[in-house]
Image (cartoon, coloured by chain):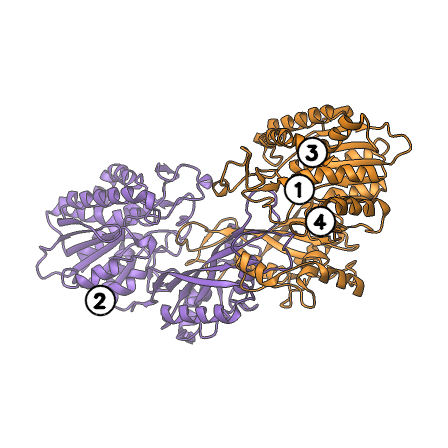
Chain colours: A purple, B orange
Amino acid sequence: MKDAIALHKDEFLEELKQYLSIPSISSLSKHKEDVQHAAEWTAKALTGAGMENVDVIPTEGHPIVYGDWLHAEGKPTVLIYGHYDVQPEDPLDLWETPPFEPVIRDGKIFARGATDDKGQLYIHIKAVDLLMKQEGELPVNVKFVIEGEEEIASPNLGPFIKENEEKLACDAVVISDTSFIEKGQPAICTSLRGALAMELTVKTANSDLHSGTYGGGVPNSIHGLVQLLDSLHMENGRIAVEGFYEGVPEPTEELRSEMAEIPFNQTRTKKDLELEDLFGEEGFSFQERVGIRPTLEINGITGGFQGEGLKTIVPKEASAKISCRLVGSQKPEAVYEAIERHIEAYKPVGCRVSLHQFIKADPVAIDSKHPLIQAAASAYEEVYDVRPLFPKEGGSIPIVEVFGRVLKAPVVLMGFGLPTENLHAPNEHFHIENFTQGIETVCQYFKKI
Amino acid sequence: MKDAIALHKDEFLEELKQYLSIPSISSLSKHKEDVQHAAEWTAKALTGAGMENVDVIPTEGHPIVYGDWLHAEGKPTVLIYGHYDVQPEDPLDLWETPPFEPVIRDGKIFARGATDDKGQLYIHIKAVDLLMKQEGELPVNVKFVIEGEEEIASPNLGPFIKENEEKLACDAVVISDTSFIEKGQPAICTSLRGALAMELTVKTANSDLHSGTYGGGVPNSIHGLVQLLDSLHMENGRIAVEGFYEGVPEPTEELRSEMAEIPFNQTRTKKDLELEDLFGEEGFSFQERVGIRPTLEINGITGGFQGEGLKTIVPKEASAKISCRLVGSQKPEAVYEAIERHIEAYKPVGCRVSLHQFIKADPVAIDSKHPLIQAAASAYEEVYDVRPLFPKEGGSIPIVEVFGRVLKAPVVLMGFGLPTENLHAPNEHFHIENFTQGIETVCQYFKKI
């Protein structure tokens, strides 16, 4: 198999470049046609790989691509999930090469979506393609469900899974959308934080006012907003919203020692990211803060005059984007309501506040001892010569919880990315070595189960 | 004189329309030639009015226009200051008619610069023009100094005044760039707040980080910024910066009752501006807060992701524009240093902060009892049948302090605008009635002194 992969590598990369050149940014309406194009490209690739019943299924948003091959009688069924949509490219000026003109440099392929998730998804398409071409059949039954709305929190995939419980029935859901601990150290993620995102807007007047005429005498929307935002955290890094920590489990000694084993080089992280210092919730390590503790982060803020120089106004409106990561049995709805109550209670004089919710996802925990997960670990070990670790990821893949709950199957988070591959940032890339070894690992996995 | 003005009114308005059609926006480099054109137009108008030694004096920025008439032996010399530059027109879509195509509607002339300051400046040019034409001479000596950089804080006029102390020597500086209290109630402003503006930037990392991978474990530049900004005010509306209030005089009982006399309709202001409530420093009235108390306002804020929807990042950088209004003997330098010390002292963990200063201007207080100011009051009274009030303006005209200090002359702030004339906003206009009565008032004033 290794030889076959080596033989076809250049051809596979050319195809992947084509895939990556489609600007399938799901969050921007102007890219709607590109997203549709990427869906059709994905369907064609599945057909080319020998999949049957391939379908581009319309939704209220972007389509879901389905395809299957169900002729391995008596063998388990694996549902492979991935997404063909990508993050916006901005800030464009920080890209060394254009985000949708894929190039290969230093053994990496650079493009928006390279690691998140077109490159990782393409591993599976090429794995079944190769197996079909070599053996004429697959060692397992396979169903592909590939969506175009992962980067906008999968609004239509959840309902689709619930409505198609039978069609999607499987023994394991396999997803490659996570990453190694570091180069050479694979990982199967066994925990994902939940997510909750919202926008907070503060309005004071019906227009910006001259700060000479009104300054000091009327409420200022930015003052109101910073006061509210600052009230969300305590100085020790804890979140100050009453009820926020409900459902957050106290970590056991066992979990804490497991977390402590995850490699983390503080000096290097500080140097690489040019951080003056680390900062987070008092009483927890970095690994715990980003892995098993909930967070509340302000992701963006805007208000008033932002051009060159100065405009002496009292701004009428300001807003901020806020997102939370949730753990344990925290419920997004309950946390949202707690934040709503907090905002209402701390609302400064003269401020009209409104809160708008974007995203919510429950936290997920996966049992690393499940045989279909242990089999994945063995597949990695054969290819990479090292046993994967089972980290708790800080990120969220909202749909994972739905897959696990509705299909009652273990979710195998077989990531092939690296944490340094700039996902959601300029110069996103994917290591070609992990692309080819990924194909090998997936083939091994299918043969094992 | 009234008859002569009525006779020439339409001709004067046609000229003013020409003046207003020049887009002399000093802050935008693409309008450099338009600003030059407006300077030349101004010089021509001075020559046409019989002024001598008319000169368009180049500076490092936009030119200063000078002209004089000094043949009123034994009579006082009045220096008339104004500016021929205007504010940018944006937001363009809110203008009912194009900003540089002046039109007359309902007794008002609409255009950018109509009230600030071309229309008010043109009052003086037409006053001397009429007097010269009627009498062949002026009752006072006159010097015009008209700049093209008022809207960008007069960077070259201060040095020009200092270098030309002798040439500009005078008994009073007359400026028409302020406004009435309301229609029919003229005002001579006797106090201007000083100004200080800066930009505060907080940086944490060298790139935006994924909030799933790093959220909760690294400093967030927006958290740092809102913490710093929120620390600048106390809940009771006072500014929390140590030393900020140094030089701010406690208002005397006399001043407080003077302030209380300035008409202010709280219900109407709240309704007009759609304010839920007023807010400001505890213990002071609205008129005091905007007139004789110092302020610190955040004029703009920006950081992280600001597009549609969400991007789950920990933002690397955030910044805010801040401006202060100063009173009494507050010194801009000292206040800036106090803010710098505050920022340094309150700097959150992991934040690199920098502060950049834009503008500074000392506060100005003018003695309303000066005979050359009382004479202006009498001139208003004759034309408008009501004695002007002597309000304390909340705004700043940075150059006023320099004129007063360097030339050692009282500054007579003889405004003819109305506070509702949308200066610095769309649909700026000027009441034609105040244009014509303004010419009459200025002629009366010159005759009186």
Asked if both marks, 2 and 3, belong to the same chain, the answer given is no
In front: label 2 or label 4: 4
Disc 2/disc 4 C-alpha distance (Å) = 75 Å
Q: Which mark is residue B434?
A: 1
Mark 4 and mark 3 lie on one chain; the one further toward the N terminus is 3
Disc 2/disc 3 C-alpha distance (Å) = 85 Å
Asked if both marks, 4 and 3, belong to the same chain, the answer given is yes
Tag 2: Cα neighbours inside 10 Å, few (<14), some, or many (≥20)?
Answer: some
**Drawn side of residue B257 relative to residue A432, left or right:** right
Q: Which mark is residue B5?
A: 3
Q: Which residue is mark 4?
A: B186
**Drawn side of residue B355 relative to residue B137, left or right:** left
Q: For the residue labelled by badge 4, is the local secondary structure a helix, a strand or a loop?
A: loop
Residue B53 percent coordinates (x, y): 79, 23
Q: Chain of mark 1?
A: B
In the rendered structure, which amino acid carries the disc numbered 3? Ile
Residue at 22% from the left image edge and 66% from the top image edge: A406
In the rendered structure, which amino acid carries the disc numbered 2? Val
Tag 1: Cα neighbours inside 10 Å, few (<14), some, or many (≥20)?
Answer: many
Residue at 35% from the left image edge and 36% from the top image edge: A101
Disc 4/disc 1 C-alpha distance (Å) = 10 Å
In the rendered structure, which amino acid carries the disc numbered 4? Pro
Q: Which mark is residue A406?
A: 2
